[in-house]
Image (spheres, rainbow, N blue to C red):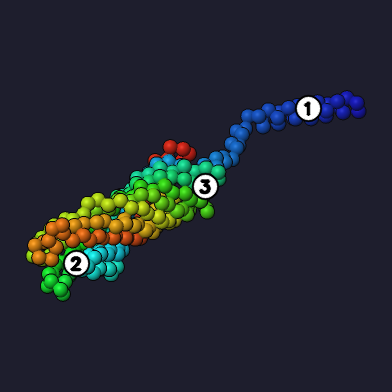
Amino acid sequence: MRKHSLTLLALATIGLVASQASAADLPRKAPVYVPPAPPPITWTGCYIGANVGGVFARRSADFGSFGSLDSDTNSGFAGGGQIGCDYQFAGGWVIGIRNMFDGTTLKRDRTLFDPITGASGTLNFKTQWFDTLTGRIGYAVAPAWLIYGQGGVAWAQNKVDLTFDGVTFGDLSNTRTGWTAGGGVEWMFAPNWSAFLEGNYMDFGNNDHTVITPVACPPPGCAFSTHAKAATVLVGVNYRFNWGKAPY
């Protein structure tokens, strides 16, 4: 009996060793691949882009004794490009700087008449382009959505073509400097690409001129001033170079 038990024990031991050896020879199942988490979206980086939209202007002219003109608001097309840089800090806060240059189709014609002297003329306002240099601060309300405000300095080429008392004076203006403020929302819709919608207000203050004509304005001439304001509504797209983390 004892000999039979020892035989069974030996056979069981041999079977266990053989099964373990066979298991060691079987191919092992590869571990399940878990992809790494994508890096967080960041607004840090520089960009270049293009924009298009509408521009709405209001211009006025004060001719002293000849009265004044307060032109109705007129509108036109605006389009151009922008370049800038942003830096994201303290969670969702973003600061940046941007330069935007847009051409416009704004123009307006007005007729002048002095009932005392009988002198008449035409006044043509044109805004050929504007350029804004602004700082901005915003907050990422969601990883890919940024709400921002901005403000800074603005330049515009506002031409005033005047024909008065039969004399054509041509361009009586130059590049004017003013201020701008506005804000908008930007959406990072794909790696390195974002789109924005924004509105801005610009004020270029008063610009003084002097007109000399033989009849109505003999030397030293008649002084008049013009004032230009404008607002824009723009949509645009930016390509972001992102010197920091990848945008997605």
Task: Quadrant for residue 182, please give it.
Answer: bottom left
Please identify, in this view, whether the residue under mark 3 or under mark 2 is nearer the observer. Answer: 2
Q: Residues within 10 Å of mark 3 (few under 14, many from 20)?
A: some
Residue 93 percent across, percent down from the top left? 52, 47
Q: Quadrant of the N terminus?
A: top right
Using residue 187 as the reference point, say whether residue 209 is left or right of it.
left
Which dot marks residue 13?
1
Q: Evaluate if marks 3 and 2 touch, with contact meaning CB atoms under 8 Å apart.
A: no
Disc 3 residue type (three-letter)? Trp
Q: How many marks?
A: 3
Nearer-N-terminus badge (1/2):
1
Residue 84 percent across, percent down from the top left? 38, 44
Measuring 46% from the left and 42% from the top, which residue is drawn there?
87
Which dot marks residue 49?
none
Could you give the CA–CA distance between mark 1 and mark 2, rounded to whole angstroms?
Answer: 109 Å
Task: Quadrant for residue 180, please give it.
Answer: bottom left
Compared with 112, 55 (above or below) is above
Could you give the CA–CA distance between mark 3 and mark 2, rounded to whole angstroms?
Answer: 46 Å
Task: Quadrant for residue 19, please give it.
Answer: top right
The residue nearer to you, when weighing 56 against 167, is 167
Nearer-N-terminus badge (3/1):
1
Q: Which residue is mark 3?
A: 93
Could you give the CA–CA distance between mark 3 and mark 1, rounded to whole angstroms?
Answer: 70 Å
Q: Residues within 10 Å of mark 2 (few under 14, many from 20)?
A: few
Q: Which residue is mark 2?
A: 109
Q: Secondary structure at mark 2?
A: strand
